[in-house]
Amino acid sequence: MKLNIKASGLELTPAISDYIQEKMSMLDKYLGDLKVIQADFEVELTTKHHLKGEIFRAEANLSVPGDLLRIEKTEKDLYKAIDKVKDHLQDMIIKNKEKILNLKRQ
């Protein structure tokens, strides 16, 4: 899957980019024959005036035929936010494939 990565409020280092690519490539086995039209991933350092320190936001958008799978998570740790997005996107892909199979059965 070709992934477009965008960073806002922080520098997109090769380590962050490689980590995102690695995590998102794990989803290929769940996608199976489901064609991904467009895949976008955004990481952001949200406002710096939080009382609890820096808050990172990770967001993934996958365009598949007939649907848009979108997940957004915020965490104190950027890598934890990326992991949560991957985990929830995995669940969403599985549910979407089940929905497609149920529609074909009817």
Image (cartoon, grey):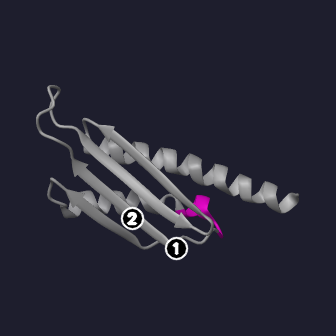
Tell me the quarter of the picture where residue 61 sits. Answer: bottom left
Type of secondary structure dominating the magenta stretch: helix
On the picture, is 29 further left or further right than 50? Answer: right
Q: Residue 89's x, y, as percent?
A: 51, 50
| Residue 31: in magenta span | yes
Which residue occupies the foreground of this view, 86 or 38?
38
Asked which secondary structure carries label 2, the reply is strand
Which residue occupies the foreground of this view, 94 or 67?
67
Give the residue displayed 35% in from the left and 69% down from the top: 4
Give the residue displayed 29% in from the left and 45% down from the top: 57
Asked whether disc 2 touches disc 1, contact meaning CB atoms under 8 Å apart, the reply is no
Is 81 rendered above or below residue 42?
Answer: above
Residue lying at the far right of the rendered structure: 106
Give the residue displayed 59% in from the left and 54% down from the top: 93
- Measure the C-alpha gap from mark 2 to mark 1: 10 Å
On the picture, is 86 further left or further right than 42? Answer: right
Which residue occupies the foreground of this view, 18 or 86?
86
- As drawn, the label of residue 40 is 2
The magenta-colored residue range is 28-33
Q: Residue 71's x, y, as percent?
A: 45, 49
Give the residue displayed 77% in from the left and 58% down from the top: 101
Hey, what amino acid is under mark 1?
Ile
On the picture, is 51 further left or further right than 31? Answer: left
Tell me the quarter of the picture where residue 67 sits. Answer: bottom right
Is 79 rendered above or below residue 5?
Answer: above
On the picture, is 65 further left or further right than 49? Answer: right
Q: Residues within 10 Å of mark 1 (few under 14, many from 20)?
A: few
| Residue 15: in magenta span | no
> Which residue is under mark 1?
37
Hey, what amino acid is under mark 2?
Asp
